[in-house]
Image (spheres, rainbow, N blue to C red):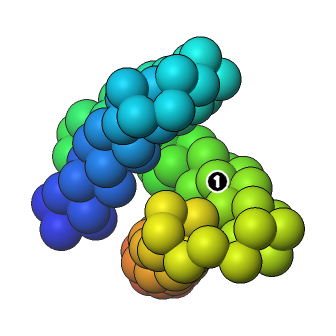
């Protein structure tokens, strides 16, 4: 449980910082808003995952899935590997980690 929570926390922090960087470098208010909202929601999910709440894993899975779809779309549109391609791959990796943790949790119940 702790490893998954740590991974989701780091991912949420990176999303939060990515939104902040998008605002600082490009003046994008939408990056700040979305990065902040998704980042804080993922950090909150990580906290509840560390407390053993199974619902928080599903929330983190949903948020990561949405972000992966957005970053993949953005990468396909711009073909710029950074930041969209990197975050797309990172989101996919986190998505797999969360899905495997949920699968393991459901099997043991």
Q: In the displayed structure, would residue 68 be above or below residue 47?
A: below
Asked whether, in this view, residue 2 is left or right of residue 12, the answer is left
Residue 72 percent coordinates (x, y): 72, 70
Q: Give the residue displayed 41% in from the left and 34% down from the top.
A: 25
45 or 65: nearer the viewer = 65
91 or 84: nearer the viewer = 84
Asked whether, in this view, residue 13 is left or right of residue 101, the answer is left
Element type where label 1 sits in the image: helix
Q: Give the residue displayed 61% in from the left and 73% down from the top.
A: 80
Residue 108 percent coordinates (x, y): 43, 78
Asked whether, in this view, residue 96 is left or right of residue 1, the answer is right
Q: Give the residue displayed 48% in from the left and 69% down from the top.
A: 82
Q: Residue furthest front?
A: 26
Location of the N terminus by quadrant is bottom left
Q: In the displayed structure, would residue 1 be above or below residue 30?
A: below
| Within-10-Å neighbours for mark 1: few <14, some 14–19, many 20+ | many
Image quadrant where residue 74 sits = bottom right
Residue 102 visible in the snapshot: no
Image quadrant where residue 36 sits = top left
Residue 53 percent coordinates (x, y): 39, 42
49 or 27: nearer the viewer = 27
Reading the image, the residue beneath label 1 is 67
Residue 23 percent coordinates (x, y): 46, 25
* Figure disc tally: 1
Q: In the displayed structure, would residue 83 be above or below residue 39?
A: below
90 or 56: nearer the viewer = 90
Residue 15 visible in the snapshot: yes
């Amino acid at each position: 449980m702790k490893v998954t929570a740590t991974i989701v926390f780091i991912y949420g922090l990176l999303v939060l910082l990515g939104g902040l960087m998008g605002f600082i470098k490009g003046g994008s208010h939408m990056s700040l808003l979305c990065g902040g909202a998704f980042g804080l929601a993922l950090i909150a999910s990580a906290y509840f995952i560390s407390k053993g709440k199974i619902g928080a894993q599903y929330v983190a899975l949903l948020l990561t899935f949405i972000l992966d779809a957005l970053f993949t779309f953005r990468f396909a549109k711009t073909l710029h590997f950074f930041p969209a391609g990197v975050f797309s791959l990172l989101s996919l990796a986190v998505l797999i980690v969360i899905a495997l943790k949920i699968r393991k949790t459901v099997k043991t119940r």
